[in-house]
Image (tube, rainbow, N blue to C red):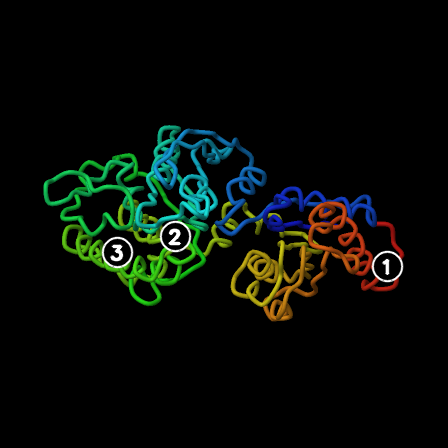
């Protein structure tokens, strides 16, 4: 019997690898001789870098970069074991979690540090870069990222514009002749699960600006600045990015990556499934375990467990999902390839208790799920020693 274990991490608690190992231990309590493939998963958001390093092999590289508010910080990126691939989370350099609530200001926040991470990967010789763009503190359209990589974003005096979303209003000319030439040879994959345009009521500023500290007045200012940015891009570079789905992701970083790096935008979980070679692990498998911290109605909208389940169904495999907690509407995942869902909660339990005991609880529920799976096999197989 072969079981593929491909969960996402439990956000803020267990990494994807820790969840995978806990599930593996529970399965082995039932079938000690089982063959397992542990394939830690992610969706382009928090934990993507660590998950891919754990799944594929490689190193976490620490570098000093410019933080979202212009401060010097230490950020990590993943240098994968093939020696030519990198995985970067923009949140590591330009994320909302790096800025205390009272200091959040998308008028000033910059993606310059994300560009510095990309530059470090280029200096390591990377020719394929996976970029996850969840959790941004910024609304600068990726302008800072482009500047860090050599692009000239100039005001009327021919000097570089300042950091932040507000400074885009001063943009008069874009010069890409000075951008890092190594980018021309790179394949940039943008892991993104939103399809917001750059501007307008559904764009970056209106939808995501408030959670980054923007007031109503600031939202209008930021949206106007991004619209001007889009106009200059179209005039100087011949690219109409304003209404491209995903351009508004991460405060418009999606647009910047597509315009300046020619990044290919793909659903986050699909990027990770491809990178980890999940399909290869599913061959000859009997069963698949997946999971995430919370499974609810939103999980059915293309989140990691559903992405894994859909791939598993291409091989006709049953799928068990384990969640830190189960929320309203979780039943929707049953229409997306997941066959059953288990919560790690053994009964009434506080969130703090569940968090503290998550690893053991995950092992226990994996054991219960595996026992049920064995019982569901044909009678002659359910008593067989696997």
Q: Position of residue 356 (x, y in %)?
A: 71, 45
Please tell me whether mark 3 sits on a helix, a strand or a loop. Answer: helix
Q: Is residue 300 left or right of residue 90?
A: right
Among all residues in the image, which is located at the extreme left?
157
Residue shown at the point (39%, 31%) measured from the top left:
72
Residue most toward the front? 102
Q: Earlier in the sequence, mark 1 or mark 2?
A: 2
Marker disc for residue 8: none
Say whether disc 3 or disc 1 marks the residue closer to the N-terminus.
3
Helix, strand or loop under label 1? helix
Q: Are marks 3 and 2 in contact (CB under 8 Å)?
A: no
Q: Quadrant of residue 225?
A: bottom left
* Distance between mark 1 and mark 2 Cα atoms: 50 Å
Residue 53 point in image, percent of width and height: 54, 37
Nearest to N terminus: mark 3 or mark 2: 3
Other residues around mark 2 within 10 Å, as few (<14) / some (14–19) / many (≥20)? many
| Foreground of the two, 186 or 247 | 247
Q: Which mark is residue 226?
A: 3
Residue 180: image x %, image y %?
26, 35
Using the image, tell me which numbered label, if any, was put on residue 250: 2
Which is more foreground, mark 1 or mark 2? 2
Front residue of 300/64: it is 64
Secondary structure of residue under mark 2: helix
Q: Tell me where residue 256 appears, x and y as whole percent.
A: 30, 49
Q: Residue at x 61, y 43 (%)?
A: 15
**Residue toward you, 87 or 161:** 161
Res. 382 mark:
1
């Amino acid at each position: 019997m072969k079981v593929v274990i491909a969960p996402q991490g439990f956000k803020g608690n267990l990494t994807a690898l820790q969840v995978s190992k806990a599930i593996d231990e529970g399965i082995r309590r039932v079938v000690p001789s089982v063959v397992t493939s542990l394939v830690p998963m992610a969706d382009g958001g928090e934990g993507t870098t660590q998950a891919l390093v754990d799944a594929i092999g490689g190193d976490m590289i620490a570098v000093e970069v410019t933080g979202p508010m212009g401060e010097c910080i230490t950020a990590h990126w993943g240098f994968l074991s093939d020696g030519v691939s990198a995985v970067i989370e923009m949140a590591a350099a330009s994320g909302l979690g790096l800025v205390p609530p009272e200091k959040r200001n998308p008028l000033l926040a910059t993606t310059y540090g994300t560009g510095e991470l990309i530059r470090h990967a280029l200096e390591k010789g990377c020719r394929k870069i996976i970029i996850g763009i969840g959790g941004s503190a910024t609304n600068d359209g990726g302008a800072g990222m482009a500047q860090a990589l050599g692009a000239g974003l100039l005001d009327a005096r021919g000097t570089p514009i300042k950091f932040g979303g507000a400074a885009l209003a001063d943009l008069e000319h874009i010069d890409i002749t000075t951008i890092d030439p190594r980018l021309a040879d790179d394949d940039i994959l943008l892991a993104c699960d939103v399809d917001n345009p750059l501007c307008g009521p559904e764009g970056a500023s209106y939808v995501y600006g408030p959670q980054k500290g923007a007031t109503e007045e600031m939202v209008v200012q930021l949206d106007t600045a991004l619209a001007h940015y889009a106009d200059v891009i179209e005039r100087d570079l011949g690219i109409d990015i304003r209404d491209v789905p995903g351009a508004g992701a991460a405060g418009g970083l999606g647009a910047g990556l597509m315009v300046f790096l020619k990044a290919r935008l793909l659903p986050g979980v699909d990027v990770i499934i491809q990178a980890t070679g999940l399909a290869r692990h599913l061959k000859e498998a009997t069963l698949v375990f997946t999971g995430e911290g919370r499974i609810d109605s939103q999980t059915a909208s293309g989140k990691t467990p559903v992405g894994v389940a859909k791939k598993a169904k291409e091989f006709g495999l049953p799928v068990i999902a384990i969640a830190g907690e189960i929320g309203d509407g979780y039943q929707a995942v049953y229409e997306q390839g997941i066959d059953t869902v288990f919560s790690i909660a053994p009964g009434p339990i506080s969130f703090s208790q569940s968090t503290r005991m998550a690893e053991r609880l995950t092992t226990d529920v994996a054991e219960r799920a595996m026992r049920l799976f064995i019982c569901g096999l044909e009678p002659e197989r359910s008593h067989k020693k696997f």
